Image (cartoon, rainbow, N blue to C red):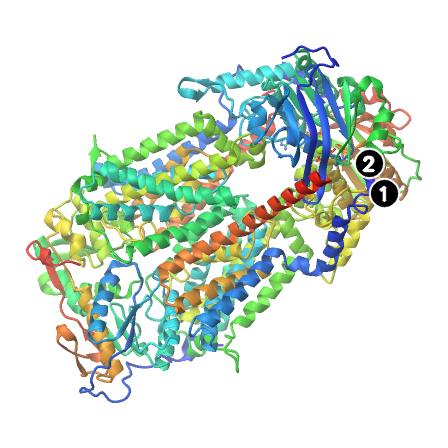
Amino acid sequence: MSPGAPGADSAPLLELDGVTKSFGAVAALRGVHLALHPGEAHALVGENGAGKSTLVKTLAGAHAPDAGRMTLDGRPLQLRGPADARAAGIAVIYQEPTLFPDLSVAENIFMGRQPLRGLRRIDTRAMNRDAERLFERLGVRIDPARPARGLSIADQQLVEIAKALSFDARILVMDEPTAALSGVEVERLFGVARSLCERGAAVLFISHRFDEVFDLCQRITVLRDGAWVSSDRAADLTVDEVVRRMVGREVSSLYPKQDAPLRDTLLEVRGLSRAGVFSDVSFSVRGGEIVALAGLVGAGRSEVARAVFGVDRYDAGEVRVAGRALPPGNPGRAIAAGMALVPEDRRQQGLVMELSVERNATLARRRALSRLGLLLGGAERAEARRWTRRLQVKASRLAAPVATLSGGNQQKVVLAKWLATEPRILIIDEPTRGIDVGTKAEVHRLLSELAGEGLAILMISSELPEVLGMADRVLVMHEGRVVRELPRAEADETSVMYAATGQGAIS
Amino acid sequence: MSLTDTGAPAQAAENPPPGPGRRRGLTERLLAVRELSLLLALGALILVTTLRNDRFLSGQSIKDLLLGCAILVILAVGQTLVIVTRNVDLSVGSILGLVAFATGELFLAAPGTPWPVALLLGVALGAVCGVVNGGLIAVAKVPALVITLGTLYAFRGIDYYWAAGRQINAADMPRSFLRLGNQTVLGVPALFLVALIVVAAVGFYLRSYRSGRELYAIGSEPAAARLSGIPVGRRVFAVFVANGALAGLAGVLYAARFGTLDAAAGTGLELQVVAAAVVGGVAIFGGSAYGAALGAVLLTTIGSSLAVLRIDPFWQQAVVGALILAAIGLDRLLALRMAARLRGRSAHGA
Amino acid sequence: GTTRENSGNDTGGGAQASGAANPDAKLKEGLKIAFLPKQVNNPYFTTSDNGGKEAITEIKGEYKEVGPSEASASSQVSYINTLSQQGMDVIVTSANDPNAICGALNQAKAAGAKIVTFDSDTKPECRQIFVNQVTAEGIAENQVKLISEQIGGAGEIAILSATANATNQNAWIALMKEELKKPEYSKLKLVTVAYGNDDDQKSFQETQGLLQSYPNLKGIISPTTVGVAAAARYLSGSQYKGKVKLTGLGTPNQMREYVKDGTVDGFALWNPADLGYLAAYAGAALASGQITGAEGDKFKAGKLGEFTVGKDGVVVLGPPTVFDKNNIDQFQF
Amino acid sequence: MAHDSLYAAPPSAADTEREAGRLAGLRGALGSWDAAIVAALVVAVVLAGLSVPNFATGRNAQFLLLDLVPLALLALPMTLIVITGEIDLSVASMVGLGSTLMGQLWLSSGLSLELICVLVVLLGAAFGAVNGLFVTGFGLPSLAVTIGTLALYRGLSFVVLGDQAVADFPASWTAAAVQTIPGTSIPAAVVPVLLLALVFGVVLHATPAGRALYAMGNNDEAATFAGVSVARTKFWLFVVSGAVCGLAGVFWTLRYASARGDNATGLELTVVTAVLLGGVSIFGGRGGLLGVVAGVLLLGVLRNALQLADVDANALTIVTGTLLIVSVVLPNAVADVRARLHRRRQRAHLTAS
Ligand SMILES: Nc1ncnc2c1ncn2[C@@H]1O[C@H](COP(=O)(O)OP(=O)(O)OP(=O)(O)O)[C@@H](O)[C@H]1O
Ligand SMILES: Nc1ncnc2c1ncn2[C@@H]1O[C@H](COP(=O)(O)OP(=O)(O)OP(=O)(O)O)[C@@H](O)[C@H]1O
Ligand SMILES: [Mg+2]
Ligand SMILES: [Mg+2]
């Protein structure tokens, strides 16, 4: 491997030229160029649906390009499947975790490459030890012998990263690896990526967070609508410039919440407890107000949201909607009472992948759309069109299965589905995870607008700027308890962090 | 910039993980418990039956038991291979019937054929049926249940067509071959030894070999398996061929054991085989070949002991059904308790 | 509502013999005669149907065999319907259920077909003739006599039957119980009836269960071909070989092995080919007007000679043949 | 254009959408598979009518339809269950148990036959509820549970009547079961089946509950989040399946005038075959009722025509199996070829431009 210095204009390790890929009528990639140089971290940015993940899957051998050339070390590269890509030294972290829930964490990491002992048997001990070493490198503790089922999204992502690292690959491709990670883990990941670069590997990094992009990468390629726009040194670019190239126009990257008159209390949660997950959680949200629930990963915010909505049961406490008690454990009743929950895991909880965009968008509203118990196609379509248009969902047609949409567009469909129920109370868990910059501002504007219309909004977010920019009040959770309530004026980076790490607990 | 952080390091410091390799994975332990409970159930059944009738534990009776379960064990183990990849093979009964009849025909056509040749040919014919199943599934990318439901009919139809209502009798087959079905080695029926070898080999393979683990990976999350470069199509194909070959083996052994063959041999066996695998815990959490084998032994023993206990014959099938329900219910209970324990301990630090 | 009390018994009575028989009528040529066994793929029925085919060839009729691949009454109904659609002159069938196929048979009759049952009967009013292999009494007598001789006239015996609801089996068993009440069998004790479901493996297991449950068991009667073969196989490979006697109804081909190795002394069966042969002639006689199915009608059945229709339209083939070491090699079926 | 691509999409896509809009009413009910299977049915009927003697007669239609009544009945709830991703293998055993219960009640209870029929349907619902409880209450895989109850219910049906058969049902009732609609040769029993099919079809395709079935078949967690009570819905589906089995048991008993422990043995596989032939995905989430009804008819027509053409039972077995395989392999193969052609065209197009 050529130990090129970062940013050196050495010969590219991997080069893509004119790569084209379409799915039916959708052209996901149109003649894309990409050159990955040894020792360099290269960012790939673009809006949702720009074709980043498709490019990644092409590199990984999971998709065969319709046209175009790939060369590795100057030699043409033909990938017939993911196994070929691995053999060529390409390790990939996909946008959605691809773990085997029934197998142990260590097996997940070393599947197909387990260390062997006599008779070509698998050496489980050595495998667990190696896994433990990898986790040490990443600075996390995950029991290698436990099954992957039940890991939180962040942990799943960490296992994926460990897996990719275990290859000691020459090319590391990471598709939004940080979307579910916290600052510390991101830093460690970057540390590892940099050390790989120092050893001459090439890194392809995808993220919607520009601070990360500029922090890690020396070169940035912009995609728009499947087409290559530019590849430049990061040093020659600014965030605004990148955004302009991505979107093709100016966008303000954040949209602060507009003040709206506060109305009556719509959601009231009192003494909510669930053994081992959260305890004695109390808060209320008024119409016109956005309350943010902040905290570290695993603080139990999502669990509270799920319990309030009725997907999970709780052991004690009560939930009141506009003064009336909501029966526990019944999402149907919660919806009827005017509540909506945009869940954090869109693939598992938010969407029915095989169903069409239209069916997904109207799924939660199907009762309201029926007349005399019968569903009428026209009303459904009109409703779906209204919301997908408002959220600018990019899909070939409304009848296309949601699975064919890009990650960010899928997220928008989830939003559309819940907004279509015209809720009074909107609980929204990581609303902009994986959403591109333009749409993010759009979502923020929408949330602000909805609050202005009198909705009570409870927002769970791991992105501090989002929390600080959008919330009227910030509730900070730590280890299953609400430890701090900060009005907008008092909420800043330090005060929230302080409370979230448990140091500011007023107990 | 994001704000979340993991409390892991602190937590882990309080709770250092035990040295690597010293403890077995939770999944593995779960399976061990599963197999243990099956053994217990089997023990209890034998005990109760023996208390009522002490001849149940006589040498002859044990020999009969072992003989009786051998074929089902082989089929259940083969089915395990298929089920762990999240597929199912409903055509095993028909493959068994076809191969059994073919074996008889072979001896009719060439009476002098030595039995090992017959055995190999039978296994090969079974494998060919497996190739048909696996090929259709791989090429057409259609759920195995549908394809094998189709070949369940198709193979049986071929068998019927071929047999055309004829029967092949013990007298048509060489003594040496028939002896295979009844012979004992150190008091253990040869048939059961064959089954034991199959169980051990498949069990060991599934647990300790890369490709064996890949089968579990495929069953656990097929899409992820594809993305991790596991040759899913090839593995699934191989699994069906292997299962076909085992069904072929079972077919030859069936011919040796029963001596009387017509085209109906093994009809309806597929449900018993799936039931054995289900009782053995395969359908619910991956499961192992050992569990499936124990499931098969348990089911056969139930059949025998009901006969010995002289349970009203009209009740027998109902009791078998109730026991299947009880077995999977127990399974579930165990799984839930394990899951509760998983939830109890955080992901970070064991 | 309709209750059992007020519904009345509207099952018609007795076999109907319509019109007058003309014993001198010639057998018609070109009769379309269909055999519908309980199940195709069953060697026993293959043999008997081939007997029927032989007879039909002799009388220059058209033979055909159809039937379900699994022994179920509902599929038989659908075959009967098909046959009556095709305008068969005679349908010769063995019923999987004495009642279930009645409606279809009556429809076929109304469409002009003559109905003959063999081996396993329906209700008498649904057919014209039942060709019985032997009388149930004949079987019961024969089987009890065989086992008594083999075990020396005293000891515990058990019966291994087919399915629990096989009509003919149950009739035989009931008559065997009657037979056992006779003084000469007073030392025989029937301990149980087990069911092997005409499934080889089940029968095998049941035999094993019998021997374990009844340590003093001296003999087993298995009046079903599947059961007797499975029981013989079990005994021949066990410590009970030769000590526990076995008899029943079996085919010589299946049992040859066990008669020769001493597991079985003797067993009985009628010749299934003759059964089919006779049924075909009975059907032809009906269709030609030689007989109507009334008691006392006489007809000639080729090589088997002359037969007389008995009560309820039953024609009996004859007493069963007993097979043992000495004669078994003369039979091939 | 970036943000509005749904509407500013390339013309071809926009066309597709407009067309989709126009056909929307049809689309829901008539997926491409449904259309194909209906077409196959029509072709089969026409071919059989032209080439098989005695096929195209009223009497034959009567026999054919009558034979299909139980199969069609069982296929209706099975379709819904399979769409939710579950399966019910115990249906045939429930028919058998319903039949023997009817026989036993008639034999010994002195109740009126009307009441007995109602009781049998209710008991069927209770058996279905046991399935439902195990599947949803205890969270067990339905394949495993219903293999267990397949044995259990069949066993119980032998317990209920033992080796007996009850056959002395009033002739007026047994005749009614096979009666035709006056002036036609269509069996009267077809009418309730059609009505039920209509009810199931409307529920599945045009009600919120039907939508929910598809959603939970694909992803039950997401369905839960959308306010669908997955467990409760599945439970009731199993109950309905049981009740319909009870009904089929009543019909079976009267049609064959015989209540026996082994009635309807093995029918479950035929039901599953018909449902899959009808285009329902065994993994759940896909398929429609029209296809299933056509699938049932196609199966019946083929069997009947082949029987009339004196094709023997063995070949029939092979045909059933092959039909099932072809029915699933063919659409995939066609889609595959089409995709390949499309890609080639695209590539040609790209190189040209
Ligand atoms: N399997 C598929 N079938 C059909 N269309 C697809 C498929 N996969 C992706 N697409 C389409 O290809 C385009 C590019 O998708 P891709 O997932 O590459 O976007 P992305 O840049 O990764 O977006 P995001 O930032 O939201 O993850 C989208 O329009 C998407 O709908
Ligand atoms: N599917 C699951 N099975 C078992 N435990 C889980 C599961 N999901 C999360 N947990 C555990 O529940 C606790 C809280 O979960 P979670 O990480 O979702 O909290 P959170 O505050 O919502 O964090 P975030 O939203 O940032 O992911 C953690 O201890 C986590 O390990
Ligand atoms: Mg993406
Ligand atoms: Mg969360």
Tag 2's secondary structure? helix
Q: Position of residue A7 (x, y in %)?
A: 75, 14
Q: Across the whole image, how many numbered discs are drawn on residues?
A: 2
Q: Residue furthest left?
A: C326
Amino acid type at mark 1: Leu
> What numbered label is drawn on residue A439?
2
Nearer to us: label 2 or label 1: 2
Q: Badge 1 is on which residue?
A: A455
Q: Position of residue B112 (x, y in %)?
A: 17, 42
Ligand 4, seen in the image, is in the quarter at top right
Instruction: Judge from the rendering whether residue C87 lies leftward or rightward of residue D325; answer left or right.
Output: left
Question: Does residue C236 lie above or below C110 as drawn?
Answer: above
- The answer to which image quadrant residue A453 occupies is top right
- The answer to which image quadrant residue B178 occupies is top left
Query: Do we see residue B16 in this rendering?
Result: no
Tag 1's secondary structure? loop
Q: Which residue appears at 55% of the width and 29% of the height?
A: B229
Dot 2 beta carbon under 8 Å from ligand 1: no
Q: Which residue appears at 75% of the width and 18% of the height?
A: A216
Q: Position of residue D78 (x, y in %)?
A: 53, 56
Chain letter, disc 2 residue: A
The quadrant the C terminus of chain C occupies is bottom left
Amino acid type at mark 2: Thr
